[in-house]
Amino acid sequence: MTRVGIIGVGDISSIYLKNAAELVPFEVVAVADLSAERAQARAKEFGVPNVLTPSELLAHPDVDVVLNLTIPAAHAEVSRAALEAGKHVYGEKPLALDREAGRALVELAGTRGLRLGSAPDTFLGAGLQTCRQLIDEGVIGRPLAATAFMMSHGVEAWHPNPDFFYQPGAGPMFDMGPYYLTALISLLGPIQTVTGQAVSGFEERTITTAKRLGERIPVRTPTHVTALLGFGSGVAASLTTSFDVWHAQVPRIEIYGSEGTLSLPDPNTFGGPVRVRLAQDKEWRDVPVERPYSQNSRGLGLSDLLASVREGRAPRASGELALHVLDAMQSTLESAEAGRTLTLSTTAERPAPLIF
């Protein structure tokens, strides 16, 4: 089993460590964090044998793969250091905060002959893989169009430190867009063009959690972003991500085919429901979701990356896919600012479905 070292043991690390032992097995041999105390506590909680500094972990001979769970602003720097140390890398989303940093990581991994992967891996879960099977089998005919919505009123009502979400490199598109874009690309193929609109509904946000109740956050990035996506397959899709909406009644994702419509589950989850309504149907019907990984299976993408090393193939949640998603997000904001349609400078192969 390929050995994993984790850099960054914040909240998200617990589900990776839990799943490493139970759901999508991989061997965690070391953890590191800027806070030695936090790293010690996480290692004790999950029985990890080595607690190291980040530099020690990168140099450790027993670490084959670095799982990068640092804050988004550090993703590119930590992943680059790991690749330069000769380690395969899998990280949380986004791959980087801008496409040039992301492109440099993909190129470095290729030059070094190393695997690079990135969350989200929810598209490998039971729900979206069921959708993939339905599309590949032609159940709704030829996909023609799609809509996707991530509508919320932000994170300041529940997140203890929500400041970052309203700064450049974050906002609803960079925070939640990866789930939606990765799902769409995995189902419909790569994106060619984007046309964006981006606005901010509020100049400030007020924190309502107990410890920072009443503090105000300046908003420095768009908080309602809409993208018109032109896919290479000919599909036209629209995606809206928002932190400005109190309530909405819209689907997460729908794909409209020549023979019917497919309703997808929340792409931030691994399960269902999956629903379909064909041209002749009088009502929607639920499609059984019987594939594995219907529960929270974060780490599935890392497990697939480890398998890709053994099998000599590309990982499904690859760096190229994550770079293409990053390009789509950044290009959407650039399109909104420029007032014109932009052609993406990247592409990515549609990931192979999980076969069981």
Image (spheres, rainbow, N blue to C red):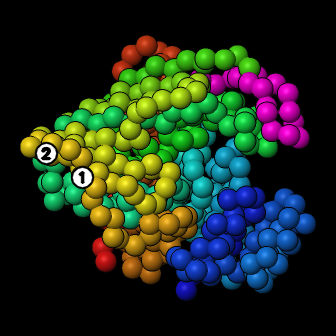
Q: What residue type is disc 2 on?
A: Asp
> Is residue 19 positioned above or below 233 on the image?
below
Could you say which disc has been placed on residue 281 in the image?
Answer: 2
Instruction: Residue 90: name its quadrant.
Output: bottom right
For the N terminus, the quadrant is bottom right
Q: Which picture quadrant has residue 64? A: bottom right
Q: Position of residue 304 (x, y in %)?
A: 45, 71
Q: Quadrant of the C terminus?
A: bottom left
Q: Residue at x 62, y 81 (%)?
A: 21
Residue closest to the eye, 170 or 337: 170
**Which residue type carries mark 1?**
Arg
**Disc 1, disc 2: CB below 8 Å?**
yes
Image quarter for residue 25? bottom right
Query: Is residue 80 within the magenta segment?
Result: no
In terms of secondary structure, where does tag 2 sit?
loop
Measured as percent of width and height from the top left, residue 110 is found at: 47, 60
How far across and down, in percent of the image, does residue 115 sit? 50, 66
Q: Secondary structure at mark 1?
A: strand
Q: Is residue 233 left or right of residue 273?
A: left
- Judge by depth and name the residue closer to the eye, 30 or 312: 30
Highlighted range, magenta: 205-222
Residue depicted at 67% across the width and 46% down the height: 72
Which residue position holds label 1?
285
Figure disc tally: 2
Vertical side of 308 occupied by 35: above or below: above
The answer to whether residue 305 is visible is no
User: Viewer-proximal residue, 67 or 156?
Assistant: 156
Foreground pick, 85 / 49: 49
Is 208 within the magenta?
Answer: yes
Whether residue 335 can be seen here = yes
